[in-house]
Image (spheres, grey):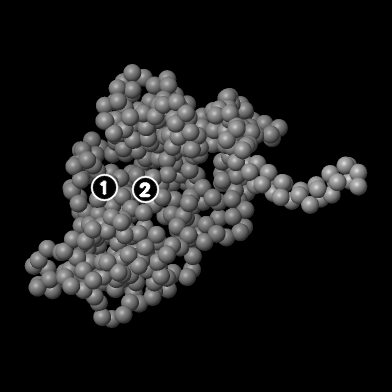
Amino acid sequence: MSSSASAAAWWARSRVRILLPVIFLAPALYFLLSPPSSPPFFFTLPTSREVSPSASGSRVIWAQRRVAEWRPCGWWRAAMPAPSRRNGYIRIDCYGGLNQLRRDLCDGIAVARLLNATMVLPKFEVAAYWNESSGFADVFDVDYFIEQTRGYVEVVKDMPEEIASKEPFKVDCSKRKGHFDYVETVLPALLEHQYISLTPAMSQRRDRNPSYAKASYCQGCYNALRLNKNVETKAIELLQAIPKPFLSLHLRFEPDMVAYSRCVYTGLSSKSLSAIEAARGEDRKALTGEAALLWRNRGKCPLTPSETAFILKALGIPTDTNIYLAAGDGLMELEGFTSIYKNIYTKSSLLTHDDFEKMHGNTKAALDYYVSVSSDAYVATFFGNMDKMVTAMRTMQGHQKTLVLSRRAYANYTAVGLSGEQLAMAMWDAHREEYIMGRGSALPEQCFCEFKL
């Protein structure tokens, strides 16, 4: 047999063993050998030759025809009554700002149903960091909450005297994530002490809960929490004072948030840089070098006000749009936004000075929440606790003009040198895809279902 024939026979026998490893290793080799300045392979440069909306003024993101949207699922609307015999009483202790408190409460409702416990009104812990001392009844309608959760979980204002006279046994749930954790370790404490308090872990595995606990979570979180009359009256007054139509923008660029992100920014004022450094502390040192680049390209760095204005223009949002700024105190570099979008309204500019000064932090946050849910359009620059709650409630009410700006897309495209009209086109393409597919809200799948349009 000739050498060429032998080679051909060897190749026929061995090609699968040789080619398979090459096929499987190719993506990893590509990722490892790509230069650091290039964007991840799942980002592609825009190839569209259409004129971007910022240049033509003829398109706006909200006018794009959606192909899918999220709506509340029907399965949890029917109550799933718990057994008549309860295992004890449970109090949910909630910490942080209003939307963190609400997150803890929503998870606590599911835990109470999971353990077949009677839930007493939650305790909102005094938070010095948030300058906050208000309780559940100072913000939410207690009677409405009890009525709307009936049939899902039992909630009471008062307990029997022999139970109410003692402090609840505190259970550490910081590492309890799934329902088996609660049943195996928390239920015995409930049965023994009959009255316990807990704070659900931040990373709950809600998807693993049984259906009755999921239904209680959905009903309690999205149908049972309504502002009390006093706060709602003030929120309606604020809403009526804003010129219509309007966009609510949740802009986050405060010193503590930037410090916590560990990101470095160029072009900021000396005042902003000093405020960021003061907020960093020893455990929040800024990332440098390759680590800083990778962190930014993963979308971990908050958008500056000027970057936010650039993206809104790229999405065709007219610069004369009425914008309600849903934000706390201490926003930095705001002139980078207001120099482009000038019709800006805030609660401090629309409410009387006395009204504003008398409000607790939770009340101020509740006003931002109410206005944002009711707005004609809502845009978030950072998908935090408030944004998750607002987008979910807007979906409950059928408000679909909701978008979370992509920090990741902006970082990746600027990392490869895009700017001006080319960057605007890239931002349009990235956000249009998110909007028309209805993917911009990251809603809890146990409560919301996707509907094709």
User: Relative to residue 108, is residue 60 depicted above or below?
Assistant: above
Q: Residue beneath label 2, please?
A: 385
User: Which residue is pictured at 31% across the width and 60% down the height?
Assistant: 176
Question: Residue 91, percent across and down?
Answer: 22, 63
Q: Are marks 2 and 1 in contact (CB under 8 Å)?
A: yes
Q: Quadrant of the C terminus?
A: bottom right
Q: Nearer the viewer, residue 190 or 265?
A: 190
Q: Residue furthest right?
A: 1
Q: Quadrant of residue 306?
A: top left
* Tag 2 secondary structure: helix
Question: Residue 269, percent across and down?
Answer: 36, 19
Q: Residue furthest top?
A: 270
Question: Residue 396, percent across and down?
Answer: 45, 58
Look at label 1 and name its amino acid: Gly
- In-image side of 410 versus 161 (left or right): right
Q: Nearer the viewer, residue 93 or 248?
A: 93
Q: Nearer the viewer, residue 415 or 24?
A: 24
User: Relative to residue 124, is residue 219 depicted above or below?
Assistant: below
Distance from disc 2 to disc 1, alpha carbons, whole Å, reads 11 Å
Look at label 2 and name its amino acid: Asn
Label 1 crowding class (10 Å Cα cut-off): few <14, some 14-19, many 20+?
many
Say which mark, if any, is on residue 178. Answer: none
Say which mark, if any, is on residue 96. Answer: 1
Question: Residue 135, percent across and down?
Answer: 20, 54
* Tag 1 secondary structure: loop
User: Which residue is pictured at 21% across the width and 38% down the height?
Assistant: 357
Q: Residue furthest front?
A: 1
User: Which residue is pictured at 17% across the width and 68% down the height?
Assistant: 195
